[in-house]
Amino acid sequence: MTNPLSKLKGIRLSNNERLRMREHLALYADMNPAFDAEGAALPERGLFAFFSSRRFSLYAGALVALLVLGSGVTLAAEGSAPGDSLYALKVNVDEPVMTVLAATPTAQAKVAANIASRRIDEAVVLARRGTLTPERQMYLTTEFGKRVKIATEKADALAANGDASGSDTVKADFAASLAGEAQALGAVSTDDTGASGLLETVVATSEGISDGASSVAITQTINDSGSNTEVSTTGDATVVATTFAKNAATTTVRTLKASGKFTRLHFNASTTLHAAAKLNAASLFTPRIDIANPKPAEPESPSSLTGGVDLGN
Amino acid sequence: MDQDETKDQFLTVYDQYADDIFRFTVLKVSRREIAEDITQEVFMRYWQQVRSGADIGNDRALLYTMARNLVIDWYRKQKDQSLDHLTEEGFEFANDDHRTIEEKAQVREVLDAVKDLDEPSREALTLRFVDGMSPKDIAAISGETANAVSVRINRALKKVQDKLRIHEQLHD
């Protein structure tokens, strides 16, 4: 019998995959130049050759900014928001580089989702500073919408190419992430901060991405000067409840408690017990949530078992 | 050597080993997209070694070792991934892969023959007979002795040949 395993040489990158990865790696090498023995960057063949190369003309803005400013500055730009001096670097350099280096459709969908979430983070930052003007909210809402469109198109393309599981995972993760973003935005959303419009958009987007699989409602009751405002987010039961409990619980719930505005956090999910177990593991509440006897369903939502915790405010 | 020469050499190494690293990875992680991501990460890390002027020695061994380590990291984050996914759902050829149906069927047939091997045996067998590595080179990557690698390869090859013979008899 001839070597049967030679048939496995048939497992390889396609021409397009190989070329695309090569382009990415070439760009990566350009952005991280080699050093000589003294730690100085090696020279290019010549400035003329560099500036007239096709790659430079494609990524000119990004390359020049990085060469001039250095990678440490892009790190500092990460936390910037509209109006900050480094914000242009963040959206015109960092984010295009992130996009270019995403080699696969899944990675591209995740990068788009990540950049969408960044716009909401920036809204939270601005709202806390008291500088979320209507113009900035309009800008962030528009940019958020653009990235959501890209992320969902990429996720849909995965399903169209036979990777329904991958598509569902990307969407569920994105919807859960947005549910967490909504929590953070809700915490700073008042009539004065101007974030309520964007908050409605984020909530609606999260519902839309998860196709309204709203067996979960995480509801915050804000009791501020006697008036009650309810903000709710919905999403996939397991993912939102688990993600909320694992990730947002240790950050968002602390934020909610510390704000003094929230009196109660409701869980309305088939995985209430799971979420409660995770929150107990995070030791956020004293006394610990009674997993065996969660609160009975609220009158207005009789269809599901509701768990809830008082936040002590 | 200037930056462009260094980069050209790096891309030459990529051209030579990209398919090998991809194949090595996809046989372990079972998903084409994951294998692509890991392959790109391997070459990015390889560039970091090249740009720093490190004395690499054996490019090929370094690439395989990096791929192996990244796969191990990936496994740690997964719950339940196995080669069964690769064969039960059918290996995913790229959309622009224009080989014949018969050629693709032959690949799947061999994949089915190797999937029941334990992971170290599958790795050693494919490195030997697909990538052409010597038992000594394989030992440098896997951490076993060259002798242990040779024994493993011979046993695994017999199992694969037996399975393929059965397949031939069933389809005659």
Image: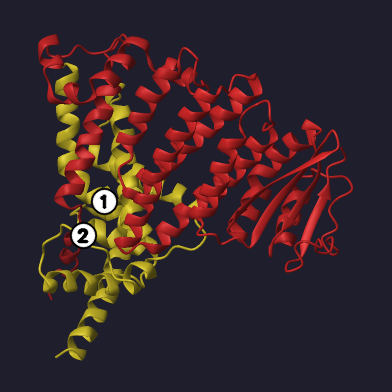
Identify which residue, B140 or A191, lies in the foreground: A191
Can residue B140 be seen from the camera position used here? Answer: no
Q: Which chain is red?
A: A
Q: Position of residue B5 (x, y in %)?
A: 14, 22
Q: Position of residue A261 (x, y in %)?
A: 79, 35
Relative to B160, residue A292 above or below: above
Q: CA distance from mark 1 to mark 2?
A: 8 Å
Q: Give, as a three-letter code, the residue at label 1.
A: Phe
Which residue does the numbered mark 2 point to in the structure image? A11
Question: Which element carries disc 1, helix, strand or loop?
Answer: helix
Identify which residue, A102 or B40, lies in the foreground: A102
**Mark 1: few/some/many CA within 10 Å (<14, 14-19, 20+):** many
Residue B22's label in the rendered image is 1
| Identity of the residue drawn at 65% across and 23% down | A128
How many numbered circles does the render carry? 2
Residue A265's label in the rendered image is none
**Mark 2: few/some/many CA within 10 Å (<14, 14-19, 20+):** many
Relative to B157, residue A11 above or below: above
